[in-house]
């Protein structure tokens, strides 16, 4: 899968993505990660990419032409117009479902805004998806883009060493992940639950499912309505 990140800070993006699982996947060719510097496409001799917004207001706005030039440089190379994600607080909330959806794409462009945003005219030309990673404002789109690349990459076949890791984790089936334990069996007076030491796989599966339901009820009750609990599970949950 190919990621093209349009940014004013390519070093920031690439330094963050060249590590851990994502970095290893890029080294083996499962992922292609590329940051395109929007400043390189400015027609200003000082590589200026921002100007005052028409109508007044605080701050500066990224101009249309440098953004469009960076976008077109990708299109000309790959020969098609892929989905282009614009990271913005005005977008819909990014979810695990989105990560799975975007992971089906062979190519993705992620556009990182800065200052007070980007000239609306170029967004109308290039952006296909307006995505937010939360109801707060950051100084730029680089961190949201890196978050999305990480989440999407995990859904690309082969990126995770153990494919089950991508299938059984938080938000799968709208349930949070169950608690997990490793050696030693007792630490600070706290013991690993007996069921996990039993070797009884069906009981372990049932326990994990119940713990996921309980944890979701405690920490993200808003997700339970979409979790598809069975009638038996709903009755059990009322009694705990």
Image (tube, rainbow, N blue to C red):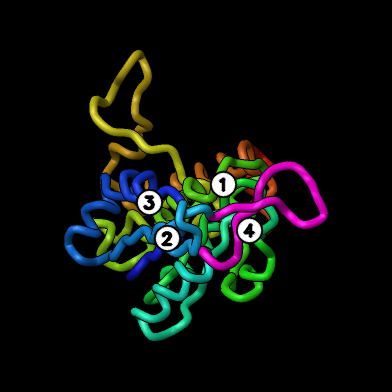
Judge from the rendering whether residue 40 lies leftward or rightward of residue 140; answer left or right. Answer: left
Dots 3 and 2: beta carbons under 8 Å?
A: yes
Residue 229 seen by the camera: no
Which element carries disc 3, helix, strand or loop? helix
The residues tagged by marks 1 and 4 sit, at their Cα atoms, a distance apart of 42 Å
Dots 4 and 3: beta carbons under 8 Å?
A: no
- Residue beneath disc 3: 10
Which span is picked out in magenta? 49-66
- Residue beneath disc 4: 118
Instruction: In the rendered structure, find residue 201 and report the number of the disc placed on it.
Output: none
Mark 3 nearby-residue class (10 Å; few <14, some 14–19, many ≥20) = some
**Which of 78/99 is in front?**
78
Mark 2 nearby-residue class (10 Å; few <14, some 14–19, many ≥20) = many
The residues tagged by marks 4 and 3 sit, at their Cα atoms, a distance apart of 18 Å
Q: Does 12 lie within the magenta span?
A: no
- Residue beneath disc 2: 5
Dots 2 and 4: beta carbons under 8 Å?
A: no
- Which badge, 2 or 4, comes first in the chain's sequence? 2
In what quadrant of the picture does the N terminus appear? bottom left
- Residue beneath disc 1: 213
Which element carries disc 4, helix, strand or loop? loop
For marks 3 and 1, give the one nearer the viewer. 3
Position of 25 relative to 179 (above/below): below
- Examine the residues drawn in magenta and state their main secondary structure: loop
Which residue is rendered at x = 69% and y = 65% of the image?
A: 120
For marks 2 and 4, give the one nearer the viewer. 4
């Amino acid at each position: 899968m190919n990621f093209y990140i349009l940014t004013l800070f390519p070093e920031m993006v690439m330094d963050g993505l060249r590590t851990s699982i994502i970095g290893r996947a890029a080294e083996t060719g499962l992922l292609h990660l590329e940051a395109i510097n929007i400043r390189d496409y400015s027609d200003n001799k000082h590589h200026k990419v921002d100007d005052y917004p028409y109508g007044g207001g605080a701050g500066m706005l990224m101009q249309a032409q440098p953004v469009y030039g960076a976008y077109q440089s990708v299109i000309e190379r790959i020969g098609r117009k892929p989905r282009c994600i614009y990271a913005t607080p005005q977008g819909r909330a990014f979810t695990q479902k989105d990560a799975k959806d975007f992971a089906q794409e062979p190519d993705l462009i992620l556009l990182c805004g800065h200052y007070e945003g980007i000239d609306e005219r170029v967004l109308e030309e290039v952006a296909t998806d307006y995505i937010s990673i939360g109801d707060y404002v950051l100084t730029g789109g680089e961190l949201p883009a890196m978050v999305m690349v990480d989440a999407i990459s995990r859904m690309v076949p082969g990126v995770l060493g153990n494919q089950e890791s991508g299938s059984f984790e938080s938000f799968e089936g709208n349930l949070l992940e169950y608690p997990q334990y490793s050696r030693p069996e007792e630490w600070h007076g706290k013991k690993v639950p007996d069921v996990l030491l039993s070797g009884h796989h069906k009981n372990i599966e049932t326990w994990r499912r119940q713990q996921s339901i309980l944890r979701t009820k405690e920490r993200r009750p808003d997700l339970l309505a979409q979790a598809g609990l069975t009638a038996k599970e709903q009755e059990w949950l009322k009694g705990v």
